[in-house]
Image (spheres, rainbow, N blue to C red):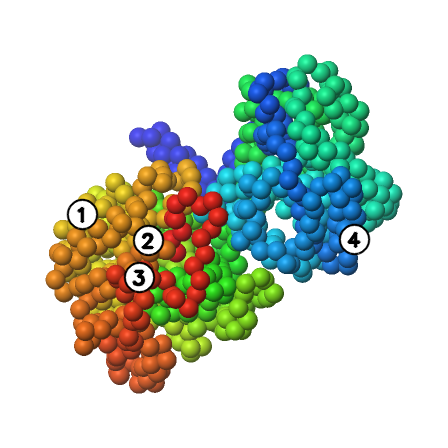
Amino acid sequence: LDVSMDLWDFSYTCLVSAWLHRFYIYFAVAFGVTIWMVIQFLTTRKKGEKSHSHLASSEGIESKVANGYATLQAEVHVARVKIFYGSQTGTSKRFATGLAEAIVSLALPVEVISMGDYDPDDCLAEETTSRTICVFLVATYTDGQPPESAAWFCKWLEEAASDFRFGKTYLKGLRYAVFGLGNSVYVDHYNTVGRNIDRWLWLLGASRIMTRAEGDCNVAQSKHGSIEADFEAWKAKFLNRLQALCRGEKSCSGKCKKGKCKSLGKESKESSDHEHEASEHENLEAEELFETSSEEEADVEEAGGANSVIDVEDLGNIMSHAKRAKVLHFVCQSLCFVHQLLQGKTDGLIYSLFPGYKLIGSHSGVKLCRWTKSMLRGRGGCYKHTFYGIESHRCMEATPSLACANKCVFCWRHHTNPVGTEWRWKMDQPELILQEAIENHQNMIKQFKGVPGVKADRFEEAMTAKHCALSLVGEPIMYPEINRFVKLLHQHSISSFLVTNAQFPDEIRNLEPVTQLYVSVDASTKESLKRIDRPLFKDFWQRFLDSLKALSEKQQRTVYRLTLVKAWNVDELKAYADLISLGKPDFIEVKGVTYCGESSASSLTMANVPWHEEVVRFVQELADLIPDYEIACEHEHSNCLLIAHKKFKINGEWCTWINYDRFQELVREHERSGGSKTFTAADYTARTPHWALFGSRERGFDPLDVRYQRKNKVRDISGC
């Protein structure tokens, strides 16, 4: 017995010790995994450098490594050259003019364009089929930012490259070259803009015609003694390459020795030597492990010859380069997070997992909605503009909680946000969150000043947010001070649209009046809800039902939000009707799921996205099962329809829109009375315009705006 007790005491002591030192154990595991991955990366890279290059195809398609990636260059001729410049002091413009004069001597049409005068959203996709060569001469300005004239172009390109709605082939067919202007004295930001433009174009499917080059204002480090000399050296190579493309020069025969391609002669050898020098210089920078560069291209070309092609069997190794870089980047993020843990900084969330967001404090965020940008330019508003009359250009999309209690299969953030069933982070005060949310929102709006197509009156209006959609990501109602935050919004005359995932019934009951309260009803049975929302709570179904019951007790406007996932939840009409009778919502939004691109977190594909006609048919069949409701509105562009309770059809006219000024008056009276003076959804309605109604010719598009159809877009999966 004593031996057994001693053994138990020893085991217990070990477990307690392991728990007390758990952060060190986490760090040891993370460190070990990192070392293993770095060894694998270096081993694979060395093998790749030793492999020989062979002929990939004999049909005139050249497979070539460009900036660490494999690109395909087809035999095509050149119709014209467009030179885009972004300049702060005039150097880029001067270089662009000089390059244009040289191209004119080749009897080629050429156009010099300031990035500030060019709308990439309207025009860039047209270059994919015009046999145009696009040249980008752009400087890096203060703190690695683009010049003012190029700010919108770069902003659009960055967002397009990370937006699943554009896809990896949006600019397929566009051929380009980049020359960046910078100063190596500013090591941290040297030629950042040129490198970014190069990378974003590639991510959108464009093809480089030659390696990116970088001019250096620092004469001590400039490869040719000055930035002018750097440009002249690059210009000579560009013109040679341009002439070769104009001749329709065939790709390498595959029989040349290393560095001595017969088809391109001395030029290739010089290019290889130059790029080898560049690689030696750039390899000193550790950050190049995580971002592609012209020097990385030189490394591979040095190994296999500047003009060699890659064997098909080796193509997988080359294409995996970018994936390994992403893995290493994630490992570094993980180590940084573990480091924070060891320092006791466990309150903050992992900021770097939210690209494009403006993060606030330790758990909040704000982001500019694409519909805000659209309405700024007179191209239409979101479905909430059509259904409820919000001004999309004055809507701030935010959340006070990036964490969520579900892992939905259609999550548009691919589950990069933290998950949890309770609040576990240091809480920021609502005053701080709102102040920084408004400031960040205004700063993002300011970036549209001077952008082609932006309406001056709407730009001025957008600087004052009038609506807040608390639906950015995560579960806003988890925030312990959500009531104070909502009150602050109303004190700033900002309406509140709050979305919850129906897992926190008590919080719904305790919620102060909001302009409109949403509950996501993503499925109508316990089995399908578990499959689609993948909730963390074990009693998720009871919580779901209790949340709907709590919603029925609210006096202000309430909404069910149904997301249709084809082959997952579109055949549960009777069950949906039963849930509607339980929660008695004022409105039911039915929307086709938005495909958010490939993700290891979800098995969803484009096959799961219903066509708009399929959504209409579902809504019509559902409306037949709920006699107190009718189809009221439609927003075809978002693949979305609105079913409304008949009490909002007053004297034969739908009143689904909101009188926002009247709501602010009512909520102020409610607060002054200490909550004794109540009001209902019927007290702040407004008439719905004809163009927003279901069956109208406009199909929900505001006739005051002009609808814009993106070029080469096959299927509209835009959503909202």
For the residues marked 2 and 4, what is the alpha-carbon distance in whole angstroms?
Answer: 48 Å
| Residue picked out by circle 3 | 697
Query: Is residue 396 something that shows in the picture?
Result: no
Residue 572 numbered tag: 1
Q: Label 1 is placed on what type of residue? A: Glu
Residue 339 numbered tag: none
The image shows residue 510 at horizontal and vertical percentages of 28, 69
What secondary structure is found at the residue carrying circle 2?
loop
Residue 94 numbered tag: 4
Label located before the other in sequence (2 or 4): 4
Task: Check the image and report above or below for 717 versus 510.
Answer: above
The image shows residue 640 at horizontal and vertical percentages of 31, 56
Looking at this view, name the residue that lies furthest to the top.
Answer: 255
For the residues marked 1 and 3, what is the alpha-carbon distance in whole angstroms?
Answer: 30 Å
Residue 211, picture quadrant? top right
Mark 1 or 4, closer to the camera = 4
What secondary structure is found at the residue carrying circle 1?
loop
Nearest the eye: 350 or 88: 88
| Residue picked out by circle 2 | 639
Q: How many neighbours does mark 2 have within 10 angstroms: few (below 14), some (14-19), or many (20 or more)?
A: many
What secondary structure is found at the residue carrying circle 3?
loop
Residue 300, picture quadrant? top right
Q: Label 4 is placed on what type of residue? A: Arg
